[in-house]
Image: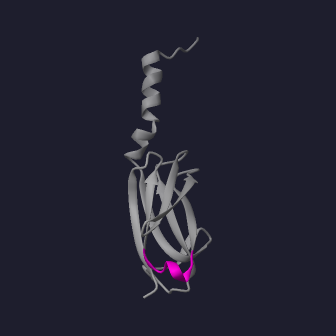
Amino acid sequence: MRLRLSTAFASALLVVASPAVLSAQLSVEVQVARQIVDRMPQDPGTSFPVDVGEVFCWSRVTGAAGTTIQHVWIHGEMEFPFSLDIGGSPWRTWTSKTIPPEWAGDWRVEIRDADGTLLDTVSFTVGS
């Protein structure tokens, strides 16, 4: 017996697997920290000393396997975007930014999906 899929049924399968449907189930957990050990943030915080050197932004993403997210590091008018491939669900990933003492002040990292939709934001301060 030969099995045939109708065009309508095949189209319905594509809709179920589309990123728009997956994004409704997408969730993100985010932290900034001084380091990452065994894929987990260590020494998380919202305030770091002016001589911190490097700060990490860690995300656990659920429901977005096979897509891409962005970490956009923002300080004043400066933006530093990083694209991250999500290989599974849940998926832990991170970026880091070297922050020299002259860039002390308020920072934030925006987590965005592949379409640029804001998923989450984490704010922190360097110095003071």
Is 127 in front, or is 17?
A: 127
Q: Is residue 34 above or below residue 72?
A: below
Q: In x, y percent, where is residue 6?
A: 47, 15
Name the image quarter holding the C terminus: bottom left
Q: How many discs appear? A: 0
Q: Is residue 73 above or below residue 63?
A: below
Q: In x, y percent, where is residue 126?
A: 47, 81
Residue in view at x 46 percent, y 16 percent: 7
Quarter of the image holding residue 107? bottom left
Q: In x, y percent, where is residue 19?
A: 45, 40
Q: Is residue 102 above or below residue 90?
A: below
Say if the magenta span includes residue 62.
no
Is 85 in front, or is 39?
A: 85
- The color scheme shown is one colour
Q: In x, y percent, where is residue 57?
A: 51, 68
| Residue that sits furthest to the right in the current view | 38
Say left or right for 105 vs 100: left
Quarter of the image holding residue 83? bottom right
Name the image quarter holding the N terminus: top right
Residue in view at x 40 percent, y 39 percent: 21
The stretch of residues the image draws in magenta is 99-106
Residue in view at x 45 percent, y 23 percent: 11
Say if the magenta span includes residue 104.
yes
